[in-house]
Amino acid sequence: MAHYAVRESPPLRGEIPISTSKNAVLPIMCGALLTDEDVRIEKPPKLTDVATLASLLDACGCRVKQESNALILKADALKNPHDDEDVRKMRASVLVLGPLLARLGEARIPLPGGCAIGQRPIDQHLKGMSALGAKVTFDHGGVTLTGRLRGAVIYLDMPSVGATENLMMAATLAEGITRIENAAKEPEIVDLSAFLSSMGARITGAGTSTICIEGVSSLHGTSWLPIADRVEAGTMACACAITGGELLLRGARADHLRSLLFKLSEAGVHIQDTQGGLMVFGRAKQPFEIRTMVYPGFPTDLQAPMMAVACRTPGTSVFLETIFENRFMHAAELSRLGAHIRVENRVAVVEGTPYLTGANVSSTDLRAGAALILAGLCAEGETIVNDEGGHIDRGYVGIEEKLSAVGGLVARIPSPA
Ligand code: UD1
């Protein structure tokens, strides 16, 4: 649980170091289960999702050692976890399925329930595992997979990020060649593939819609520095677009953020790709249209932060959410600050207004919470963001510290005033 007090802020100026990517680190941590040797992950982001997954890996017989700037994982006593609690806490825990099955010939996890942004089934993960030869049985609210894996051709009905990652990991130790068609192309998939290759896996095509994996009999330890977090970088770019100013997002990669950068440019924000990272200058002045899509389309994770930008940008901006069915919950909270937003099913229409005013608002999910902090930066007076679920700490490292360091008036407070 956390609460933030946000005040109308001057233009943000300075440098924000971008952390390593949550969505890259979580699958990489699960990938460490594929070997009994040491896997060293450099500069892991200090996030509750990372801590939750570390606790689940520990329950899977993987020793987890935290050094000052590295996480060392050693899965030399691999087993299925007894306690379901950590799996339930976090959707990404489903990614232990592939490695457990590949190494033990058996994997069991509770079925993830619905979540705030939609139903999020795992049918594509299971369909793929079954194509690899696993027997899938459902019992007592969980799913059990058993069997020795053999290479196969798998067609995903939609390019699911998690299913692509899970199947890629399982196939590294399957006998023979696996081809995943209609695979997800996100940068985190490319990073996972490079990480697995550094452990001895044979993978080609990551970053395209066909990924080929030639199974090997075992993988070895490695040391890996994951990519910078494109969602954190994008969120900070949106913060600049809201207040104006000049930010260097240290370590951010323009090639991972093309769709956002095009949209910010259309809105009148200037972007410069430099050696140290991305420079972002000035405030959004024109409205824009956003359709969330799989990579390289506009990321659903940046839809909420861009909606915060649209609230104060003159003109009518339009959002179409195609990935998750219930991802506009921040719209109602932004409206409490005086934003003009109409939501109809998967479409949100935002009329930019010259003023927002501070209010008490609630964070309903991770990116929604960040969007509310951003909106507070341009709302008159004080905005209190109540994050009862601790969503923001799941995916942003010290968001209040990073924004404060460049002039944002954001503080973590013990409980709402
Ligand atoms: C990952 C990211 C998340 C991001 C999302 C979409 C991580 C830890 N999380 O989540 O931040 O918002 O990608 O870019 O990397 N689906 C099915 N069946 C399946 C799998 C998915 O129907 O078996 C549907 C989902 O309900 C959703 C869509 O496919 O509507 C996308 O899901 P997916 O790409 O799997 O997202 P995640 O891997 O869960």
Image (tube, grey):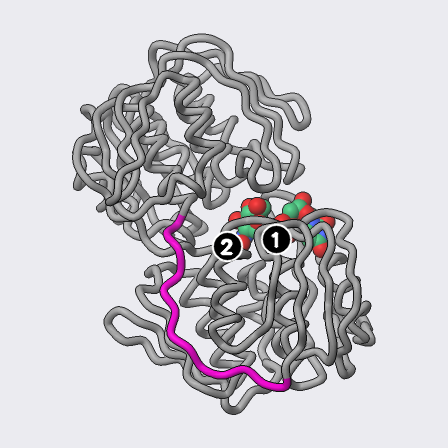
Q: Nearer the viewer, residue 358 or 184?
A: 184
The x, y position of residue 393, in whole percent, is: 37, 52
Residue at the image point whose x is 38% and y is 74% from the top: 223
State whether residue 119 appears in this view.
Answer: no
- Amino acid carrying label 2: it is Glu
Residue at the image point whose x is 55% and y is 38% from the top: 300
Name the secondary structure under disc 1: helix
| Mark 2 vs 1: CB contact within 8 A | yes
**219 sits left or right of 322 in the view:** left
State whether residue 125 appears in this view.
Answer: yes
Residue pointed to by mark 2: 188
Q: Is disc 2's CB within 8 Å of ligand 1?
A: yes
The x, y position of residue 366, in whole percent, is: 46, 45
Name the secondary structure under disc 2: helix
Q: Magenta stretch?
A: 217-229
Give the prevailing secondary structure in the magenta stretch. Answer: loop
Which quarter of the picture shows residue 131? bottom right
- CA gap, disc 2 and disc 1: 9 Å
Residue pointed to by mark 1: 161
Which quarter of the picture shows residue 95? bottom right
What is the crowding at mark 2: few (fewer than 14 residues within 10 Å), some, or many (at least 20)? many
Q: Is residue 30 above or below residue 343?
A: below
